[in-house]
């Protein structure tokens, strides 16, 4: 047998690579997967030993309706959970909610036609899939997805429903649901009802969802032969008080996100399931006015495996304000039980408890629940059955059914659930509400994403945050509406700058974290990849427009190009337009914009009659 010479080996290698390219047809590239979003053991992904086969999972759990979600901030996941509950309670469907990253998709073609698949898909950033939907999106929109059977068309058996979450202020509005819907149709799948679209940019996301789902259920009932029945609350989670445990017990979670943090041995990868407890190197105020705040913070990631590129996002894991925690526990008559240790378990096989247990009521409310979030009409209608009196029940029923009445009484004042219930019942406690209903009806407390305002070329291990502290005066509301994360960051800034017990605007926070693990001015964070980048060719000219804190990523871009110049690189013309209310009050980074050695132009946009150049 003749030996292969070098040329033969090269030719064979080229043929092998060409074969792989042909048969994968883009599956190995296409959508850029977030390099920081790798799966984390024992977190939200499929656990070891659990099947990734959709059909196998549905059969072993007796399900006939699966609701997949692609979610970045938790809203799509919440909508998926609500569809699952409604499908079961109203129509007797055996539903399950599924994270898209937990399953494979090559056997969608083998799903029986008497089952239905729902897709609830958020669009992130510049038309990108959410982190957990990248693999699915890449697969289903590829030129020729490889399925398990030889059907023609491949998905002719698949009945599906689709709803998208987007923001019309971005160019690629709801591109995820639109592109996935187009791909499914191309593959022969049968959509039931219209593909719905919610618009966060117009502030109508919730009403868009509610307006879409009712005709969708009607179409689904007709298609699948479903009969509607009277909806009755059925808990998904069971709550068990652990009388043998105290909060001091080492196995009790007091806000720690996972077992490694509980044990005091957190390690990477640090991502959306596993934050890095990062020290804040420095923080200071950017505004020169008493009633408004804008923070500059520098987060040190040198002790982790985290990295970032200029233009990426940093996610801050906030803590709820003590005042709101107290208000929530009080209205549900849980104040005296706040430190009682409880276990939470799923009562049906496909449900996931959204936080680690055993834990306490206080820890759940403080670290894991979106208690300050806007209230949904659907959740209000659910809670009507547990009202403390008939008058409160009637009011809740009206709020849940009348869109305009709900908007005037609830949305216009940004009322959270505890504030609303106290108003409706005139202070009476809502003792009949099962805690399981609160876990199911309120979102998990989500990280808040901020555009990184530093350059990774200039400071690779320091991430800058530029954030206005959210505070809004609203008609009919006694106190201003205050943002969850930015006021938490303000408290951290005040402590770092000399206040031992900061109470910004009267709010208090457990800024030392569970078991004092955040002491020394630390904040839980992870990094999220973004496609918002400088041109790959640094000689290309750029124009940037960033009023207010919209300037944050552009500060990073300008500093990046300045560093390139310092390193001897040629860069193109760099023009930045910036706007503020008054140059004497909120001209952010005023001293920085005089960049030497960089072909740059800075314009301050006119505001309130003034023009700065």
Image: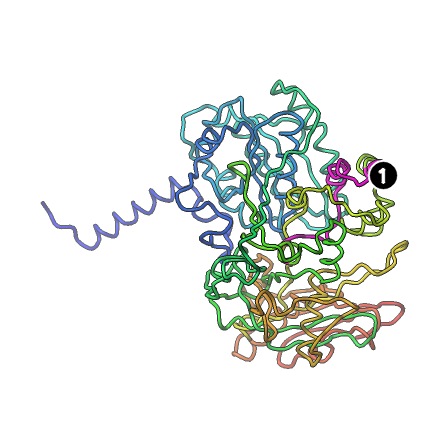
Magenta region's main secondary structure? helix
Q: Dot 1 corresponds to which residue?
A: 395
Q: Where does the image place residue 146, in percent across and percent down from the top left?
A: 42, 35
Q: Where does the image place residue 504, in percent across and percent down from the top left?
A: 76, 70
Considering the numbered disc 1 on the image, is that residue within a helix, a strand or a loop?
helix
Judged from this view, the residue extending furthest toward the left is 1
Judged from this view, the residue extending furthest toward the front is 244
Q: Looking at the figure, which quarter contains the C terminus?
A: bottom right
Q: Is residue 194 magenta?
A: no
Residue 410 vs residue 334: left or right?
right
The answer to whether residue 24 is above or below residue 449 is above
Residue 258 visible within the image: yes
Residue 571 visible within the image: no
- The span picked out in magenta is 367-396
| Foreground of the two, 562 or 86 | 86
Q: Looking at the figure, which quarter contains the N terminus?
A: top left
Residue 538 vs residue 439: left or right?
left
Q: Where does the image place residue 551, in percent across and percent down from the top left?
A: 70, 66
Q: Residue at x 47, y 36 (%)?
A: 105
| Foreground of the two, 154 or 19 | 154
Scheme of colours in the image: rainbow
| Foreground of the two, 80 or 122 | 80
Q: Is residue 384 magenta?
A: yes
Numbered marks: total: 1
Q: Residue 145 occupies which quadrant of the picture?
A: top left
Q: Where does the image place residue 163, in percent across and percent down from the top left?
A: 65, 37
The answer to whether residue 60 is above or below residue 36 is above
Residue 474 vs residue 43: left or right?
right
| Foreground of the two, 567 or 389 | 389
Label 1 CA crowd tier, 10 Å (few <14, some 14–19, many 20+): some
């Amino acid at each position: 047998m003749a030996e292969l010479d070098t040329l033969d080996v090269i030719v064979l290698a080229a043929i092998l690579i060409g074969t792989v390219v042909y048969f994968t047809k883009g599956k190995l590239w296409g959508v850029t997967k977030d390099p920081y979003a790798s799966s984390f053991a024992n977190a939200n992904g499929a656990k070891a030993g659990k099947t990734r086969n959709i059909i196998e999972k549905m059969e072993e759990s007796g399900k006939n309706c699966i609701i997949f979600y692609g979610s970045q901030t938790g809203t799509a996941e919440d909508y998926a959970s609500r569809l699952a509950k409604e499908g079961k309670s109203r129509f007797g469907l055996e539903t399950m909610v599924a994270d898209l990253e937990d399953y494979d998709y090559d056997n969608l073609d083998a799903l029986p036609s008497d089952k239905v698949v729902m897709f609830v898909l958020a669009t992130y950033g510049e038309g990108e899939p959410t982190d957990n939907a990248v693999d699915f999106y890449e697969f289903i929109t590829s030129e020729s997805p490889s399925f398990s059977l030889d059907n023609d068309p491949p998905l002719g058996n698949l009945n599906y429903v689709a709803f998208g979450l987007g923001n019309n202020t971005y160019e690629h509005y709801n591109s995820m649901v639109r592109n996935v819907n187009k791909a499914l149709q191309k593959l022969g799948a049968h959509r039931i009802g219209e593909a719905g679209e919610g618009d966060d940019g117009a502030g109508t996301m919730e009403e868009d969802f509610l307006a879409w789902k009712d005709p969708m259920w009607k179409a689904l009932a007709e298609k699948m032969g479903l009969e509607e029945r009277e909806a009755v609350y059925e808990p998904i989670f069971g709550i068990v008080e652990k009388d043998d445990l105290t909060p001091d017990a080492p196995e009790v979670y007091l806000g720690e996100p996972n077992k490694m943090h509980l044990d005091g041995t957190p390690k990477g990868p640090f991502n959306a399931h596993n934050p890095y407890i990062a020290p804040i190197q420095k923080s200071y105020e950017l505004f020169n006015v008493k009633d408004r705040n804008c923070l500059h913070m520098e987060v040190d990631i040198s002790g982790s495996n985290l990295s970032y590129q200029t233009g990426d996002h940093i996610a801050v894991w906030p803590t709820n304000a003590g005042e709101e925690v107290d208000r929530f526990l009080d209205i549900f008559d849980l104040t005296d039980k706040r430190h009682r240790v409880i276990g939470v378990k799923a009562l049906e096989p496909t449900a996931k408890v959204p936080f680690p247990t055993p834990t306490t009521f206080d820890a759940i409310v403080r670290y894991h629940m979106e208690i300050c979030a806007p209230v949904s009409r659907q959740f209000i209608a659910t809670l009507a059955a547990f009202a403390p009196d008939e008058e409160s029940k009637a009011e809740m029923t009206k709020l849940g059914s009348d869109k305009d009445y709900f908007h005037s009484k609830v949305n216009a004042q940004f009322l959270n659930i505890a504030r609303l219930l106290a108003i409706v019942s005139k202070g009476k406690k809502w003792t009949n509400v099962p805690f399981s209903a609160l876990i199911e009806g309120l979102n998990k407390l989500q990280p808040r994403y901020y555009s990184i305002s530093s350059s990774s070329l200039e400071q690779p291990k320091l991430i800058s945050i530029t954030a206005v502290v959210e505070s809004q005066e609203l008609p009919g509301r006694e106190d201003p509406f205050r943002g969850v994360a930015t006021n938490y960051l303000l408290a951290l800034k005040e402590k770092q700058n000399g206040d031992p017990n900061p109470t910004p605007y009267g709010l208090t926070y457990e800024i030392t974290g569970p078991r004092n693990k955040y002491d020394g001015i630390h904040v839980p964070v992870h990094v999220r990849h973004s496609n918002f980048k400088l041109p790959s060719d640094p000689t290309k000219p750029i124009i940037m427009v960033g009023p207010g804190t919209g300037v944050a990523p552009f500060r990073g871009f300008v500093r990046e190009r300045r560093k390139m110049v310092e390193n001897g690189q040629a860069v193109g013309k760099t023009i930045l337009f910036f706007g503020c209310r008054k140059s004497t009050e909120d001209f952010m980074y005023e001293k920085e914009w005089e960049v030497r050695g960089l072909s740059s132009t800075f314009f301050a946009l006119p505001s309130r009659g003034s023009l700065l150049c």
